[in-house]
Amino acid sequence: MNHIIVDLEATCWKSWKLRNAMEIIEIGAVKLSADLEELAMFGRFVKPVIHPQLSSFCTKLTSITQEEVDKAAGFSAVFSEFMAWVGPEPYYWYSWGDFDCKQFGKDLAYHQLAWPERETHYTNLKYLFADQRDLPKPVGMMKALRMLEIEFSGRHHRGIDDAKHIAQIAKIVLKGKG
Ligand code: AMP
Ligand code: MG
């Protein structure tokens, strides 16, 4: 079983009122082998269609620019490229929190696509991390990294950089899973 660690970025606004209109603008992912060796990385921007214009809040948060999403392919094309990158091997997939799983569901539904038939087991690493360490409540990715004394390098809120660091946490958590 490979392990696929995913982090999505999405259109956003200062107000969460528009959260139902959020769309994926970046898919970042890391593929680990069954023995937790890093096999490959995936990072693609996605062109949003509901609100094609990024808010300045979104660009500030993620550092993703209007030009980068304008040049990007749409969700359907990037998602099939992503699934091709995931490859034919069986896999489990993971993210930090339930946002990514939910947002994938929303974008797939909006584009009238189904979850891939071979969609396999999903684990929310945020909860697994909290369970393993008996934390009183789940913590954010940055706090988990500080607890593990892993320094963040790159840009927080960029899918590819977040995915790389969540993969580092995943390696530790999955080793401890026994
Ligand atoms: P993250 O993986 O933490 O970078 O967050 C994923 C997505 O959630 C971002 O691309 C934003 O769309 C949204 N998001 C994260 N933090 C905030 C925030 N403080 N305010 C509004 N949206 C946010
Ligand atoms: Mg992120």
Image (tube, rainbow, N blue to C red):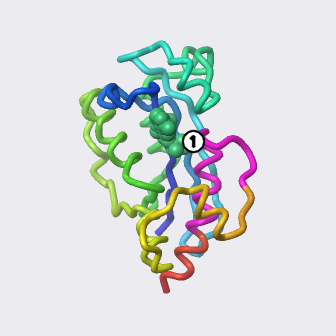
What are the residue bounds of the magenta stretch?
152-170
Query: Residue 18: x and y, percent?
Result: 34, 25
Circle 1 crowding by C-alpha within 10 Å: few under 14, some 14–19, many from 20: many
Residue at (29, 36) in percent of width and height: 106
Residue at (64, 53) in percent of width and height: 164
Q: Main secondary structure of the magenta part?
A: helix
User: Is residue 107 visible to us here?
Assistant: yes
Query: Residue 126: x and y, percent?
Result: 46, 63
When asked about the image quadrant of residue 148, the answer is bottom right
Residue at (61, 55) in percent of width and height: 142
Residue at (43, 59) in percent of width and height: 93
Please determine whether, in this image, residue 137 is positioned above or below residue 61.
Answer: below
Query: Residue 163: x and y, percent?
Result: 58, 51
Please determine whether, in this image, residue 110 is positioned above or below residue 7.
Answer: above
Q: Tell me if 175 is positioned left or right of 53 in this view.
A: right
Q: Tell me if 2 is positioned left or right of 43 in this view.
A: left
When asked about the image quadrant of residue 80, the answer is top left
When asked about the image quadrant of residue 61, the answer is top right
Give yes or no for residue 37 being in the magenta stretch. Answer: no
Mark 1 close to ligand 2, CB under 8 Å: yes
Residue that numbered label 1 is attached to: 159
Give yes or no for residue 169 being in the magenta stretch. Answer: yes
Query: Residue 173: x and y, percent?
Result: 54, 74
Under mark 1, the amino acid is Gly
SS at badge 1: helix
